[in-house]
Image: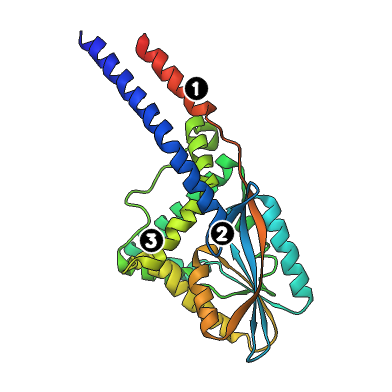
Amino acid sequence: MRKILRRIWRSVLLFLLVLLMLVTYPFYWLAMKLVNRFGTEYIRCRNGNIQLPIVTYHAKKNGRTLMFAPTIPLADPEYYAELNKLVRIHQTCGYSILHDKIRPLTKEQRLKLQPAEWEAKRQLQAVYAGLRWIKQVIGLASQPRSLPYRKNRQEWQNVDMSEVEFLARVSATKSYFFKQIPDFKKPEQVSDLTKWVLTKLFNKLVLVAMAFELYVRFSKKRSKLWQIVINSRNEIGHIGLNRVQSGNIFMLWGVDRYSDMNAVLNSIGYKIVNKRWVSAYQLRKTGWRVPLRLAWQFIIKQKK
């Protein structure tokens, strides 16, 4: 009797879940259309592609031009190929190339790390491991491997925070990215449902960015960790920008820090004169075959 009641209860729950999805889906569909249509100032979705801007600033005071390219750590290979092409063209035209990339520890600095700083480093390595995992599962290119930072380290200027400073600041806040370091499975061991969920989430990158934008703009007090990730790195980037005494600039900078950096540029006299959009990620077809198949397998299993 208990088994029968349990099966009935599970069937009722499944029915209610499907019903809820059917009722809410039209509102969800409309909301996603609006989100993708308007996006934010640094990301949008058009014609099945997630796009990022290439922004041209001009300062009347000194007549300098600044090309600003907000970047993301994972994207389609064609996006990074387009960025490489733009950088080469502007470098040939005499532009100074500035970029963000946390400068790694030296051997001497590594030996001097305190226990709290080692924990911060473990956290940072987990973030990098997570990005590599998503890259392999979905099939994307990564920014560090697609943009020739090492090859051009003599010509390009890294105006980001050093790793030793980043670790010191993070460890001082005692705020970390993860409460427990996740254990990422090998891509071939990842289930179809996990791949489907990840791809679905990446397809909703504009929605994620909009939620992040609202948090950044309207939260009364940002977390100490985000202050380091966004504010502090932008402040150091601003200092690096000021070190370029003459000539025009091409700047590669993280998309998550674009809003704050845009405000900084406006405050020092740079105004937007042009913005064009570049496709960074072509939406993957996900459909509902995978979850429906798994749901059907679950129903069949319950009937046995």
Sequence-wise first label, 2 or 3: 2
* Residue appearing at x 48%, y 31% in the figure: 193
Residue 91 percent location from the top left of the image: 75, 74
Circle number at residue 293? 1
In front: label 1 or label 2: 2
Which residue corresponds to mark 3? Answer: 120
Which residue corresponds to mark 2? Answer: 43
| Three-letter amino acid code at the position of disc 3 | Ala
| Three-letter amino acid code at the position of disc 2 | Ile
Q: CA distance from mark 1 to mark 3?
A: 41 Å
The front one of 102 and 246 is: 246
Sequence-wise first label, 1 or 2: 2
Using a 10 Å C-alpha cutoff, classify the residue at mark 2 as few (fewer than 14 neighbours), some (14 to 19) or many (20 or more).
many
Q: Are marks 1 and 2 in contact (CB under 8 Å)?
A: no
Residue furthest to the bottom: 61
Tell me the element at label 1.
Answer: helix
Tell me the element at label 2.
Answer: loop
* Residue appearing at x 25%, y 16% in the figure: 6
* Residue appearing at x 63%, y 64% in the figure: 53
Q: CA distance from mark 1 to mark 2?
A: 33 Å
The front one of 47 and 163 is: 47
- Is residue 240 placed above or below 276 in the rendered structure? below
In front: label 1 or label 3: 1
Sequence-wise first label, 1 or 3: 3
Pick the quarter of the image with the C terminus. top left
Tell me the element at label 3.
Answer: helix
Asked if residue 214 can be seen in this view, the reply is yes
Residue 140 percent location from the top left of the image: 62, 47
